[in-house]
Amino acid sequence: MAANPYPTIPIDIPTRHGPLSVLFSEAVTPSSRIQCSKLSNTAFGKSISKSEFLEREALLGAHPLAAGARWRFWNFTLADASADVEDEKEAKIGALIKTLHRDLLIRDGDGTRREQGYCICSVVTDKEYRGCGLASALLKKVAEWMDGEGGAAASMLYSDVGDFYVSKGWDILDASQSTLTVPVSLPSSEKAAKLPKTRLLTADEIPALAERDVHDLENEFRNHDPAADETLLTVVPTPDMISWLQTRANFMNTKLAGKIPEAKGSICESAGSWVYWFHDLHAHKMTIQRIKLPQGQSDENATKALAALLLSAVEEAARWKTTKVIIWSPGPEVRNATKYLAEEFGIGVEDEKRGDSIPCLRWRGDEKRRTTVYPNEYYAWS
C-alpha cells in the first residue's frame, strides 16, 4: 500500500490536561493497519485471543466487501508520541474509526438510484486518552471525508450509545426485534406438514438468491410513490453483504465451538420467499440476517409461508442446541407469522426494543430528511 495520503498539520484537541496535538491519517500500510487492529481488539475482541482477533481482521480484510479501499482505517495519531510496533517506528494511535463500503438504494422525488454509502464501525479510543474528545473530533473528520472525497450519500452505524452519535449528526432508527424461544419439544412433523414446504439453504445457493432479492427490491422501490418530503432508503442486500457476516460467523464458530453449521438459511420455493441466518454457537443463539417476503401470495398464504420459514429456523437452532432465534426490525408480515407460530405451534415470541446495536443514519452534510429505512435488517450490521 502507498504511504498515508492524508498528511495534515497537527490538530490541537483541548482536554482537561491541556491541548493534545494529533494528526488525522489513514492507516494504509500493513504494519499501521495491524496497529489499528490491535487497538480495535482492546474494545471488540473479548471472546477470542489477540492473535485470533488479528487473524479475523486479516480474513475480513480479504473479503470482497472490504477488498481494495472499501474498508478504511482512519485514526488520530499523537503528534508528539510514538511506539515500537513489530520493530517499526509507528506513531501512537489515540483513536480509530473504520468505514466499510455500502451500496445504498434510495427512492425520493428525484427517482430511484444506487448511491455510495458507508458503515461506521470500530469507534475506539486508546484507554490512555479516553475522555479527551478524540472520538468526537475524529468522527467530524471522517464525516468531512465522506461528504467530500468519499462521495457518500449517507452513512450508518450501530451502537450501544446511540445518543452520543445523535449529537454528531447520526439520527437513531427503529431498533425493535422479535426473539423466538426454541422449545424443549419441537412441533410434530404431522403438524409442521400443514405449512408450505421448505428446505435448507447452503452457502453456494445464496449469491443467486441475493441477486434475485436485489432485483425485486429495486422494482419495489421504483414502484413506490413517495410523499413530497419522503425518502425511502436501504442498504442493498448484495451477495457480498450476506457473505460478510457468514464469513465472520464461520470464523468465530470455528474458534469458539470447533464446528461450522452447513445450513445458512431456508427457502419456501412455492412462495418465492427465503431467509438467511448465521449461528453464534458460543452464545447459543441464531440470528436471521434477511427475510425475503413472499411474492404474489394472499395474506393468509404469505403468513403461512413465513411461519414455515421461521419454524425451519427454530428447528435448525434446536439441532445445534441453540436457545433463541433473533429477528431485527420485523415488519407487519413477519409479526403476523410469529403470532401464528405462537398461537398454532406454541413457540415463545418476545417483541421488544433493542438496548444495543442501535442503528443510526446520517445524510451527507448533516441534511435532515424524513427517512424510512426498509428493509432495516441484520444483514447490514458490521
Image (cartoon, rainbow, N blue to C red):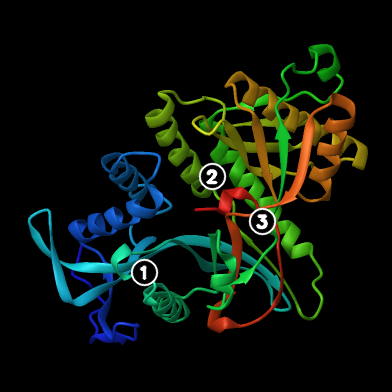
Asked whether residue 30 is in view, the answer is yes
Looking at the picture, how far across and down is residue 136, in whole percent?
43, 76
For residue 62, above or below residue 175: above
| Real-space CA distance between mark 1 and mark 2, rounded to the nearest whole angstrom | 34 Å
Query: What residue do we see at 28% from left, 44% from top?
Result: 50
Q: Quadrant of residue 263?
A: top right
Closer to us: 80 or 73: 80
Q: Which mark's residue is nearer the viewer, 3 or 1?
A: 1
Q: Are marks 2 and 3 in contact (CB under 8 Å)?
A: no
Dot 1: few (<14), some (14–19), or many (≥20) neighbours within 10 Å?
few
Q: Identify the residue position indicated by label 2 in the image.
A: 242
> Which one is earlier in the sequence, the residue at label 2 or at label 3?
2
Q: Identify the residue position indicated by label 1 in the image.
A: 130
Q: Quadrant of residue 27?
A: bottom left
Closer to us: 182 or 5: 182
Looking at the picture, how far across and down is residue 180, in whole percent?
72, 35
Look at label 1 and name its amino acid: Arg
Q: Which mark's residue is nearer the viewer, 1 or 2?
A: 1
> Which one is earlier in the sequence, the residue at label 3 or at label 1?
1
Asked whether residue 126 is in view, the answer is no
Disc sitting over residue 21 in the figure: none
| Real-space CA distance between mark 3 and mark 1, rounded to the nearest whole angstrom | 32 Å
Looking at the picture, how far across and down is residue 315, in whole percent?
68, 22
